[in-house]
Amino acid sequence: METVPALRAVGQMRAGDHLLLGYEADEERETVVAAFLLDGLASGHRGLVMGPADVPAELALTFLGTRGCAVHDELAAGRLTVDPHLSTPEGLWDLDEVIRRETRRAVGDGYLGLRVSMEITREQAGRGLKTLHDSELLLEPVFASLPVLGICQYDRRVFDDLELAPLDILHRGRVSADLVWHDDLLSITRTFAPPGLALAGEVDDSNVTALARALQDETARVRARTVIGSRTRLDLRELVFIDVGALRLLVFTALALHASGSALALHGVAPHLRRLMRVTGWDRIPGLRLDEGNVREEVLP
């Protein structure tokens, strides 16, 4: 029986966590790593970024600057550091020693711990990924014994699932972006490939405002991408209930998007919901696109 790796939101990480991020879009990697490092700054940790290329530190951390981080100041103070070690041919061979040394240095400098972001390329992995496997194997004792947290990043457009599966057992699970919203009824999650939001559970008058905020933020991200024809996408496959008030919010959002040249695309719309929207005429609203996808039959209006 196939074992599913434990999934932990980046905001739930704690000391000793050595997690794998298999990403399919650069935006996903940047979202998770930015949260990881910014949480570290707020928690008294030093952030160490180890990328696959030897580039200027401020350039390597551009994605933090776009999220309000004063990158130049954090680098100058030593709260953030960029190490090109992984860009060297021997980068993986002594990675455990580098992290052990940098963790002790961070603690010696008065920090409560170290957060390490590591991006791995196929060129570094070695034939049959053996070099990579051996390196990851040596990392676990470091994370188990010192106040350090780490995320190993693998581009799933380069590494396939069969290659990543053996690496899962060398990590304590996989990491994901933080939930946009979570209560007893509803979870809202960002998706990245394709970009959008996924709803799971129930939407009613107790959490419809959370959905409105999430839609507004996602719409702003869509507009920032400046791609012609971009849509705000909602994945409804795990939605089990949505009330009429929330449906009206979707119609209102679709009309507003249409006015700006965009649209709201609903993926995985259940048959019961499609029938309601057809009876009310909402399925013909300008800017609203419906796609059945892989739906749950029990979704009720």
Image: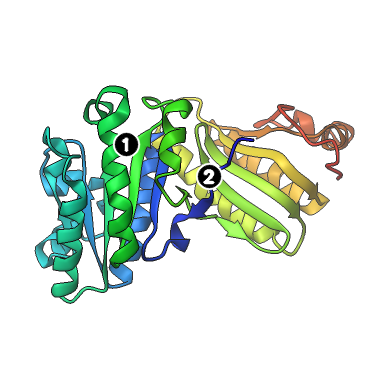
Q: Nearer the viewer, mark 1 or mark 2?
A: 1
Give the residue at x 28% y 39%: 134
- Of 156 and 163, nearer the camera is 163
| Mark 1 vs mark 2, CA separation in Å | 17 Å
Answer whether labels 1 and 2 touch (C-beta < 8 Å).
no
* Observer able to see residue 224: no
Q: In this view, does 285 lie to the left or right of 101?
A: right
**Residue 155 point in image, percent of width and height:** 37, 32
Q: Is 115 rendered above or below residue 139?
A: below
The residue carrying pointer 2 sits among few (fewer than 14), some (14 to 19) or many (20 or more) residues within 10 Å by Cα, namely some
**Which residue lies under the disc numbered 1?**
133
Residue type at mark 2 is Pro
Give the residue at x 42% y 28%: 163
Give the residue at x 74% y 54%: 203
Q: Is 260 rendered above or below residue 108?
A: above
**Residue 260 point in image, percent of width and height:** 53, 36
Q: In which quarter of the image is residue 275?
A: top right
**Which residue lies under the disc numbered 2?**
5
Q: What element carries label 1?
A: helix
* Observer able to see residue 290: yes
Residue type at mark 1 is His
**Furthest residue toward bottom:** 110
The residue carrying pointer 1 sits among few (fewer than 14), some (14 to 19) or many (20 or more) residues within 10 Å by Cα, namely some
**Residue 1 point in image, percent of width and height:** 64, 35
Q: Is residue 258 left or right of residue 31?
A: right
Give the residue at x 70% y 61%: 207
Q: Is 22 rendered above or below residue 145?
A: above
